């Protein structure tokens, strides 16, 4: 699809990174807003804009950092059965790339990763599978919930990440012997609903 302005190859990390940056840059300046509330930035309710894209990606960064930390710890513990450990290794690499894309796109405005406590979820097979499915589902629902608030460029950038998280969700269910897709549509979640789910999961310290 050469010749189409802004075309993004999802299998090309450098291309995706450049696209994310273009989606968040106005006049050569990185823009981000919102104060941290309960561990997540406050999202604006204004019309789509590069500024709001940056707020949403800052919000998404917390979820990607959480997933990356979860899988990294699971791999380091190395107590999971082979299929789960393989999934954790692959997902860890993907999530760390997601974090890198968002951090580089946000530049100096990128937030620090939250402190985490995963308890037994990174060493117990059943707890790991349940937690992984919950985290991947939450990420997909969070991105979907903000889709209408993103500019066209921001939405295209987000879509390259959320589709991978959705594949993770299906993969972990298949390993656990559950239906990879149990319903025809996924319900989006608002920021407040995401915060509530994160609080119930309890992996972020001080959230």
Image (tube, rainbow, N blue to C red):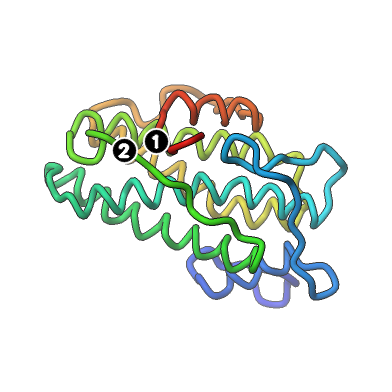
Residue at 62% x, 37% y is 144
**Residue 203, labelled with which disc?**
1
**Residue 124, labelled with which disc?**
none
Q: Residues within 10 Å of mark 2 (few under 14, many from 20)?
A: many
Q: Is residue 138 above or below residue 160?
A: above
- Viewer-closest of 91 and 197: 197
Say whether marks 2 and 1 touch (CB < 8 Å). Answer: yes
Q: How crowded is mark 1: few (under 14 residues within 10 Å), some or many (20 or more)?
A: some
- Viewer-closest of 74 and 23: 74
Q: Please, what secondary structure does the residue beneath circle 1 have?
A: loop
Say whether residue 92 is left or right of residue 142.
left
Q: Is residue 157 above or below residue 30?
A: above
Q: Quadrant of residue 205?
A: top left
Circle 2 residue? 118
Say whether residue 155 is left or right of residue 46.
left
Q: Between disc 2 and disc 1, whose residue precedes? A: 2
Q: Quadrant of residue 1?
A: bottom right
Residue at 74% x, 52% y is 53
Residue at 55% x, 64% y is 101
Residue 135 is situated, as x and y percent measured from the top left of the image, at: 42, 36
Residue 9 is situated, as x and y percent measured from the top left of the image, at: 56, 68
Seen as rendered, the residue at the extreme front is: 206
- Viewer-closest of 117 and 178: 117
Label 2 vs label 1: CA separation? Answer: 5 Å
Say whether residue 38 is left or right of residue 79.
right
Residue 179 is situated, as x and y percent measured from the top left of the image, at: 33, 26
Q: Please, what secondary structure does the residue beneath circle 2 have?
A: loop
Residue 2 is situated, as x and y percent measured from the top left of the image, at: 66, 76
Q: Quadrant of residue 24?
A: bottom right
Q: Is residue 73 above or below residue 10?
A: above
Residue at 37% x, 37% y is 170
């Amino acid at each position: 699809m050469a010749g189409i302005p802004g075309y993004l190859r999802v299998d090309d990390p450098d291309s995706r990174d450049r696209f994310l940056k273009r989606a968040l840059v106005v006049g050569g300046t990185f823009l981000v807003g919102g104060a941290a509330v309960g561990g997540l930035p406050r999202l604006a309710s204004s019309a789509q804009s590069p500024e709001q894209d940056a707020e949403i990606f800052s919000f998404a960064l917390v979820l990607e950092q959480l997933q990356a930390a979860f899988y990294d710890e699971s791999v380091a513990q190395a107590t999971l059965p082979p299929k789960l450990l393989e999934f954790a290794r692959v997902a860890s690499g993907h999530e760390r790339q997601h974090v890198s894309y968002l951090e580089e796109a946000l530049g100096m405005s990128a937030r620090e990763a939250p402190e985490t406590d995963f308890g037994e979820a990174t060493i117990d097979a059943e707890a790991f599978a349940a937690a992984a499915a919950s985290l991947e589902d939450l990420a997909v629902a969070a991105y979907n919930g903000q889709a209408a608030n993103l500019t066209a460029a921001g939405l295209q950038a987000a879509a390259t990440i959320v589709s991978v998280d959705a594949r993770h969700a299906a993969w972990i269910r298949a390993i656990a012997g559950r239906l990879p897709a149990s319903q025809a549509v996924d319900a989006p979640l608002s920021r407040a609903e995401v915060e509530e789910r994160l609080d119930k999961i309890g992996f972020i310290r001080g959230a």
